[in-house]
Amino acid sequence: MAALSLSSIVPPALSRSVPLPLIALYLSAFCKSNFQYFTVGGTLIVIYLLQLCSRGGFLLAMEEKGQLKRTVIDVTAGLIAGGISRTVTSPLDVIKIRFQVQLEPTTSWALVRRNLSEPSKYTGMFQATRDIFREEGLRGFWRGNVPALLMVMPYTAIQFTVLHKLKTFAAGSSKTEDHIHLSPYLSYVSGALAGCAATVGSYPFDLLRTLLASQGEPKVYPNMRSALVEIVKNRGFRGLYAGLSPTLVEIIPYAGLQFGTYDTFKRWTMAWNWYRSSNINPHGREDGLSSFQLFLCGIAAGTCAKLVCHPLDVVKKRFQVEGLQRHPRYGKPVEHRAYSNMYDALRRILQMEGWAGLYKGIVPSTVKAAPAGAVTFVAYEYTSDWLESRLT
């Protein structure tokens, strides 16, 4: 593959807004073999996002007091919402990860080649729940929760903050009530770009979470530090970003669908409320929606996004754990360089495990996505409103 020239892939507008050494650092840190085009694309999206926000003057240089206050509210509400959602849904996340990194089939009917049939550790959601509880106790359901919190809290804070800034840029107003009237397209693009920025900023913690949550008992890595040392020792510092490329490819449709459909469902619900009662102002604040309605909108948004993007999440998990140790009782480990690139991973999983392989863990993932999305959005909305009332 021909070497990439920095000047050939970085638009002049970007190089004027973002220092070239920073761009080179991003590219050298994230490019890896055949992933480089996906990674460069995702990286440039993030760089463009930084350039876009700094051009508007509301990310790094917020001169107005109201903008600074709004950012404090977004960051704090995002941190709290992300922490609550991750802790509440951790058991389902652990079960999902166990299925995703398991090479053996969950059911015999899903096999493409019958001669590949081997005993599977986990065969169903309830069986997995029972075995984890019996072998690891309640603590097993919160395995990897510390790096998960370290990941999801800055992730959610960055995501909601950047999302609000992009919506402010698109709507020409920093008022939340004006953002509800943005088109689905702008909501989708804002959500996708916000998701990319948040992913790059918190990805190493995501990898550590996957590694600790998938190991079970007996532990291969007793704590987060030992896992970090093992990753750096075996794969170097770039190993902390293993699987970033499929993650960036996944996060664009996932975050876009999640936020785009959430805003769409809210508009539909507000219109339905207006239809039922003329006392509700269709152009008013989101306060016209009850907490239960916000909950349902969050459930619908999270479920839609998860169903579409789950195969890429499986691929990401395989890259995150490839070449790392795993106790034999949990099945074969993913060998080092088992997949040459994302397309090869999709092809090999489909060839060896069938379509069911691409949707391993879809049941706990879907069950988790609904309450996770609902809890995140409701917690964010209420925390944001409470902070706004206190700080104004």
Image (tube, rainbow, N blue to C red):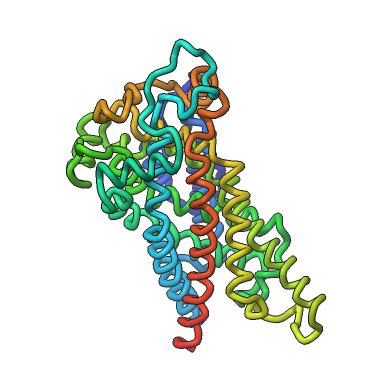
Whether residue 16 can be seen here:
no
Quick check: 306 above or below 105?
A: below
Residue at 76% over, 78% down? 282
- The residue sitting at the top extreme is 115
Q: Is residue 281 left or right of residue 372?
A: right
Quick check: 305 above or below 74?
A: above
Q: Is residue 305 left or right of residue 272?
A: left
Q: Is residue 151 left or right of residue 17?
A: left
The one nearer the camera, 351 or 27, is 351
Where is residue 296? Give x, y as percent: 62, 64
Quick check: 220 above or below 64?
A: above
Where is residue 205? Give x, y as percent: 33, 48
The one nearer the camera, 80 or 64, is 80
Quick check: 59 above or below 91?
A: below
Residue at 54% over, 23% down? 109
Where is residue 386? Give x, y as percent: 48, 82
Residue at 79% over, 82% down? 277
Question: Number of callouts in the render?
Answer: 0
Q: Quadrant of residue 112?
A: top right
The one nearer the camera, 293 or 34, is 293
Residue at 33% over, 50% down? 141
Whether residue 31 can be seen here:
yes
Where is residue 309? Give x, y as percent: 57, 41
